[in-house]
Image (tube, rainbow, N blue to C red):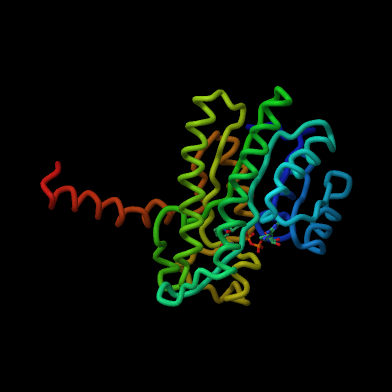
Amino acid sequence: MIDHDGKVALVTGAGSGIGRALAQALAARGARVVCADIDADGVHETAAGLGERALPIVCDMADHEVAVTLVHDAGTWQGRLDLVCSNAGIGLNRRVIKQELDERAERLFEVNLFANLRMAQAYARWTEAQGSRGRLMITGSENSLSVPSAVRGSGLALYAATKHGVLVMAEWMKLEFEAGNVPVDVHVLMPGAVYTALIAKHMPDPSKAPPELNLIMPERCAEIALKGLDLGLFYIPTHAHLAVDMQPRMRGVAEAVEALGLS
Ligand SMILES: NC(=O)c1ccc[n+]([C@@H]2O[C@H](COP(=O)([O-])OP(=O)(O)OC[C@H]3O[C@@H](n4cnc5c(N)ncnc54)[C@H](O)[C@@H]3O)[C@@H](O)[C@H]2O)c1
């Protein structure tokens, strides 16, 4: 079990939902938490609930310079930065047939994918410069792995592309960090449906959620996330159906290998 007591964590997207629950769960285990978000009201509300344990920072993760500044400011606050939860994210629902590569689509990739890369680079350089060791957990999704049966038809193609990107980028990152002795352990949190603002837009009443969604609350998601870190897991799924939803893709490739006579 990781001892978070007296440690410092940076959580992006801490003004709401999963990020807020991660900040609260880390603080409950003794950590001091730098809470970053573009939503000033949300991030100050999160920080106010944690008192002196929290430092709120308002920033836009799509800003290319932000990761370096944020890591520097978070690390300077208490002279250490033990964990970064790179969690801020946005959604976009549109049918593939109508997907337009407009500004919203570009922002989706900036926030959900490239911001995580910039954060990883900034944190890796900071830990190397400090001669310290760190831990990075990037928030992917059930959409990192498959077309989940519960959200089929929801127009998540571009969102899912960003989340697939997060996963494969983290897999490469982990290998590169290990090979290059970069002192950062990498993890990917892959939530299924969690009742946050992201979902509440489409489903105001969580009690009316279809059972196949297996909707959980952000606090449960954070609890699983911290347990995953405690166990040293690289893949941290929050729902059992993630493993099941992957199977059609793997089976499809296996059947194609068979059909093509490649086995
Ligand atoms: N809720 C779910 O069911 C679910 C499932 C899988 C993955 N996720 C992922 O979890 C993460 C957190 O989402 P959530 O469900 O808690 O949603 P949320 O909307 O409650 O929280 C996301 C937070 O990120 C912040 N944010 C958005 N863009 C930002 C930017 N450019 N810079 C800084 N902060 C920014 C928002 O202001 C918000 O506070 C996201 O990466 C999301 O894709 C959520």
Q: Is residue 43 left or right of residue 170?
A: right
- In x, y percent, where is residue 208? 55, 76
Above or below for 17 versus 66: below
Q: Is residue 21 visible?
A: no
- Residue at point 45%, 77% (across, down): 98
- In x, y percent, where is residue 69? 76, 43
- In x, y percent, where is residue 237? 50, 49
Above or below for 114 versus 84: below
Q: Quadrant of the C terminus?
A: top left
Q: Quadrant of residue 91?
A: bottom right
- Residue at point 59%, 38% (across, down): 229
Quadrant of picture, ligand 1: bottom right
Q: Quadrant of the N terminus?
A: top right
- Residue at point 14%, 48% (across, down): 258
Residue nearest the observer in this picture, 193 or 133 = 133
Most distant residue in the left direction: 261
Q: Is residue 132 left or right of residue 244?
A: right
Above or below for 96 versus 125: below
